[in-house]
Amino acid sequence: MVMAMANSATILTVVLALIGLALLRAAAPASAQNDCGSCPPGYCCSKFGYCGTSFDYCNGNTCQSGPCTAGGAGSGGANVSGVVTDAFLSGIKSQAGSGCEGSSLSFYSRRAFLSAASSYPGFARAGSEADGKRELAAFFAHVTHETGHFCYVSEVNKNNSYCNSSNTQWPCAPGKKYYGRGPLQVSWNYNYGPAGRSVGFDGLGNPDMVAQDPVVSFKTALWFWMSNAHQVMPRGFGATIRAINGALECNGENPAAVNARVGYYKEYCEQFGVGPGNNLTC
């Protein structure tokens, strides 16, 4: 009898330990650091500052950065690989001219884009298929404008360091410059820092990585898009212009740039067989 009771107690202890371990593992996808910049690549940051990959973290009502979805679980939208074909990208690149940094190095490849996009399952996957295609058209419209049809990997004018020294959370590294690089020409230390932490490279200490590794380059652009523009797509293309470069272009600041972005967007929507929607300018 004593032996049986001892065995029962031992079994109960083991069972409780296994239950506790299972609970810990179930909770593993979310980390409680309360710092969106600390989320691993492909994780969403909830409005409370916690990282995770489930609907509770990534849906549009609670997600503040990462691969957020516009209120859904990311199961709808467009077939990204089916829409973004080699022919589509070649059509953009063909207008860049010869001798361009991006085209001569074949930096902006479809393979690099799709590899990067796989880390952001919410990208172009919210809402209807038409909604997803409009998001793809919007993303590549901005990319076309920012890179001159995939011509530029780095900003032409590299004299400006784009260092905001008052930003102590993401301090500039000595001798480093944070000028525009990649598909969306991401700039400033306060973007390179969190982008690097999310994507998985030293954004502050090695910003040149965005101009050296094509997958990192597209991931950095998609990080910026998902953190700033993805969630405003339902408001129209004009809202994405404001999210990306509103201070310099919106409210009559640079109508030529706005019109160029809108023109590319309408062109790509037509190629994808969808209407551009309303509110195209900012």
Image: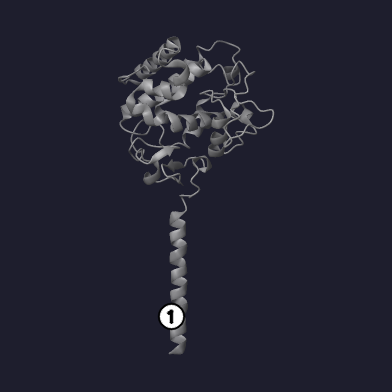
Tell me if residue 89 can be seen. Answer: no
Specify the farthest residue to the bottom.
Answer: 1
Report x, y in % for residue 177.
Answer: 64, 25
Specify the farthest residue to the right.
Answer: 175
Mark 1 crowdedness (10 Å alpha carbons): few <14, some 14-19, many ≥20: few
Q: Is residue 16 left or right of residue 272?
A: right
Tell me if residue 228 can be seen. Answer: yes
Report x, y in % for residue 272.
Answer: 36, 21
For badge 1, the amino acid type reads Ser
- Asked whether 199 or 104 is in front, the reply is 199
**If the image is split into quadrants, where does the N terminus sit?**
bottom left
Specify the farthest residue to the front.
Answer: 166
Q: Is residue 209 left or right of residue 281?
A: right
Q: Secondary structure at mark 1?
A: helix
| Quadrant housing residue 140 | top left
| Quadrant housing residue 171 | top right
Circle 1 is placed at which residue position? 8
- Asked whether 271 or 55 is in front, the reply is 55
Report x, y in % for residue 222.
Answer: 48, 30
Q: How is the image coloured?
A: one colour
| Quadrant housing residue 277 | top left
Report x, y in % for residue 98.
Answer: 58, 11
The answer to whether 213 is drawn above or below residue 75 in the figure is above
At horizontal 45% and vertical 12% (from top left) the residue drawn is: 254
**If the image is split into quadrants, where does the C terminus sit?**
top left
At horizontal 57% and vertical 34% (from top left) the residue drawn is: 193
